Image: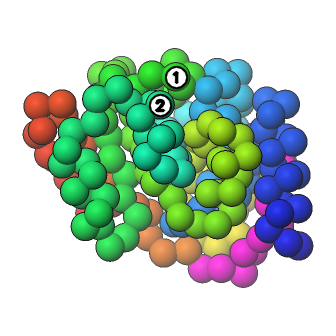
Amino acid sequence: MDINTEVHNAYEVIKNGGIILYPTDTVWGIGCDATNEDAVKKIYALKQREETKSMIVLLNGERMMYNVFKEIPEVAWQILDLSEKPTTLILDNPRNVAKNIIAEDNTLGVRMVTEPFCFKLMERMKKPLVSTSANISGMFTPKTFKEISPEIIKGVDYVVNLHHDKVCKNPSTIIKLGLDSQVKVIRK
């Protein structure tokens, strides 16, 4: 399959409130429009995950980052510039996203992507994309498409036909940044 066809197919599902199974720059993810509360609910239900456990959101550039956060600590840009591997930043006071994706402490984890499929899909959506590992909550995170449980595959509205043979690296580094510029590494 070619990437543009897959972007088109995934976009059609997402714009109608559906959820997709797709390759990210780290592991396989389950995703939807990060501004659609009902679509986010479908992911929580599929993962059998409490809504108090927030999920992360992928962004495809600075403009989208400023659309989600009015204030971004300068150190956030420095970390992103220096990161050699995918890095998720947890930042304060997100806006313009579904309420049920924001953590109880009013933070949101976000990751900038360069992976071509994710990048092009968000270009088309003009919105951030939810990303959570393709597993039932509490189960292991699959490193390959073959390891994803049939329950997850059947539970999504569309499975992206790209990189089914790719072996994923580790999940991203997670760093929490307060507006007071406090930095806390949550996962290396």
Q: Amino acid at mark 1?
A: Asn
Tell me if residue 63 comes above or below residue 68 in the rendering. Answer: below
Residue in view at x 78 percent, y 38 percent: 14
First in residue order: circle 1 vs circle 2: 2
Disc number placed over residue 96 in the picture, else none: 1
**Which element carries disc 2, helix, strand or loop?**
helix
Quick check: can you spot residue 186? no
Residue in view at x 11 percent, y 31 percent: 180
Residue in view at x 40 percent, y 26 percent: 94
Q: In the rendered structure, which segment of residues is drawn in magenta?
A: 156-167
Separation (CA) of disc 1 from disc 2: 7 Å
In percent of width and height, residue 124 lies at 73, 46
List the residue tagged with mark 2: 67
The residue nearer to you, when weighing 174 against 94, is 94
In percent of width and height, residue 89 lies at 33, 47
Badge 1: residue crowd in 10 Å (few <14, some 14–19, many ≥20): few
